[in-house]
Image: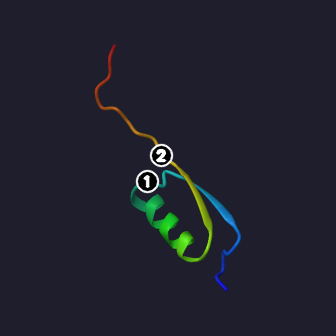
Amino acid sequence: MKLLSGKTTIITGGAKGIGRGIAIKFAEQGSNIVFTYFLQNKKRKN
């Protein structure tokens, strides 16, 4: 049995970097993953 089997984890910033790594590790341990991310548009209209 995995450590986080049957648990759900919410991870903010889970699309890349540290958040992505955490999401992968939690999923490997059996957790259901919900993650958010912020897509920043570099072109801003004033």
The residue most toward the top is 46
For residue 4, which numbered disc appears in the image? none
Q: Secondary structure at mark 1?
A: loop
Q: Residue 27: image x %, image y %?
A: 55, 70
Q: What amino acid type is highlighted by mark number 1?
A: Ala
* CB under 8 Å between discs 1 and 2: yes
Q: Residue 46: image x %, image y %?
A: 34, 13
Question: Relative to 37, is 6 on the left or the right?
Answer: right
Q: What amino acid type is highlighted by mark number 2?
A: Tyr
The residue located at (43%, 53%) in the rendering is: 15
Q: Which residue is denoted by mark 2 in the rendering?
A: 37
The residue most toward the left is 43
Q: Quadrant of residue 43?
A: top left
Q: Residue 4: image x %, image y %?
A: 66, 74
Residue 9 to residue 4: above or below: above
The residue located at (40%, 56%) in the rendering is: 16
Name the quadrant of the N terminus.
bottom right
Q: Which residue is denoted by mark 1 in the rendering?
A: 15
**Observer-nearest of 7 and 46:** 7
Residue 37 to residue 7: above or below: above
Residue 18 to residue 43: above or below: below
Q: Residue 41: image x %, image y %?
A: 34, 32
